[in-house]
Image: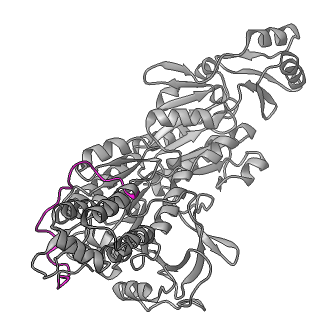
Amino acid sequence: MRYHALACDFDGTLARDGLVPEATMAALERVSRSGRRLLLVTGRELDDLLAVFPHADLFDMIVAENGGVLYDPGRRSLHPLAEAPPPEFVERLRAAEVRPLGVGHVLVSTREPHDRTVLAAIRDLGLELQVVYNKGAVMVLPPAVNKASGLTAALRRLRVSAHNVVSVGDAENDHAMLRLSECGAAVANALDAVKEHCDLVLRRSHGEGVADLAAALVDSDLRGVAITRHDILLGTADGAAVTVPPYGTALAVAGPSGSGKSTATSALLERLGQAGYQYCVVDPEGDYTDFEDAAVLGDPTRAPTVDEALRLLEQPERDVVVNLLAVPLRDRPAFFAELLPRLAGMRGRTGHPHWTVVDEAHHLMPPELAEPPVRDLHDIGGLMMITVHPETLSRHVLALLGTVIAVGDDPSVTLRSFASALGRPEPRLPAGSGEADPEPSPITVWDTREDEARRLRLTPSEAQRTRHRRKYAAGTMSRDKSFYFTGPEGRMRLRARNLQTFLEIAEGIDDDTWMHHLRRHDYSRWLEDSVRDSELAGLVRAAEDAGELDARTSRERVSGLVNERYTLPAEPTRYDPDHDDDAPDPGSGAPR
């Protein structure tokens, strides 16, 4: 379910001359019984509203005074959301015999042509107030107070995201609320300027139009209403923006190691966060712990729990990264199999998180998966999977897939793997694919319903993330990527699974073993090929080439370079010593 709340304007939308048809109220009762929240958002003062509208208790929250006041009908509690109007301003208007004149907890209201008197009083008194118009009504409020700010406060109390809200209105003061909501609707009697900026224009006016909207919301969740203004930017092709819908989208980011998967994923996550879509990243390797705006659960020494992730995600403005570094490799699929259905259950209840992002998806959703954690993509909203091995994804998950983002200069292998797994013909590649590309961040996007892929320029994230730093510092690298201390005669085979264990083993081995690998440039080659840190590899190679350094001094030099570049945990990483037995054996004890 995409929409979990309906927000209605009162005068001119829900009501005609202060009266709401019984059929409209019956339609709103259906919305409430469907589990959705109802909010009333009005420019009226609360006492005035309650005097003419006897059904206020049907609504979960009422925003009155054009965003200035929040009222909870269930608790009969009122909360001003801004400061009261300055007494000298009100006295100035009374002295000028401005009538009608309404003075609320935050709002001062009158009608045209008294707006000229209002503006003169604001100017003469040097006040910072705004004037808002509504079909001849004139409302005076503190800066930045409007229906959108009031609706935001109400949604925060209900723990509902604006991306799960449909709102409906008719006049100038509804613009901000309609823009804030995921879907903004206008009744047939709305101003043309309001209709032009709405996602949906209803065929009937006033309460009858609201009743039609309520019925469509309950019966189909507005699935027939196409909304593109929230689409997420991927990149540009021939100067035009290329986007993906923020809802009902399953996409995969795939390519060989070092091809730019993290760059593409970080860019998409940053844009989701900026747009206010809540995401939950399942992070097996600790690659996403540097996201400043996300709460990170788990670290190299402490496994996260599903319950604590769900507690944080209850707040729709909070993004979460679930770091599985401390979960043994063989236990991670089971953790994910518990997490995903509960995320789907939470989404069914609240509408968020809006996106679930699964790194190393081939490990967490392997072909052996007997039953899919979810069967319908609408259960989880948006799904992003990052993988190096698309051919090893579960067929249940592949069945959901709509978009493939292939990163790197030669996308043919990646797209061929997906096409084969999906049982579809390999898409045609645009001209020039596979050639050296001088432009930064090329990506190829394939809509799996189409016969041809598109070559794009990825629009990068604003902040560069420290790629894989946590994994290499304290995670568990695979056997073929680990470093092996063998010594000059190959009699030992000490495996360093990350930089931390590399330094711990280096400190304890004999000088001959240390110098054997140093002279062969094994350390710098491992840092270059497996850790993929060319800058650090260059610095270590300089230490390897410094023939005057003895074992003790060269150890200190290499350790200092690693510690300066990476922040290592104080305690050793927990891992399962028997895991990863199916990975390829490196053969001789040499680093790979």
Left or right for 23, reference 295: right
- Percent position of residue 290, x then y: 42, 53
| Residue 216 percent across, percent down from the top left | 52, 54
Can residue 147 be seen by looking at this rendering? yes
Q: Position of residue 195 (x, y in %)?
A: 73, 51
The image quadrant where one finds the C terminus is bottom left
From this view, report whether residue 69 is shown above or below residue 311: above
Q: Nearer the viewer, residue 526 or 252?
A: 526
Q: From the viewer's perspective, is residue 294 above or below residue 445?
A: above
Q: Is residue 283 visible?
A: no
> Which quadrant would the N terminus be assigned to in this image?
bottom left
Q: Position of residue 84 (x, y in %)?
A: 66, 16
Identify which residue is drawn at 22% across, 69% down: 371
Q: Which residues are magenta?
A: 565-588
Residue at image position (69%, 21%) is 107
Main SS class of the magenta portion in the image: loop
Q: Picture quarter containing residue 515?
A: bottom left
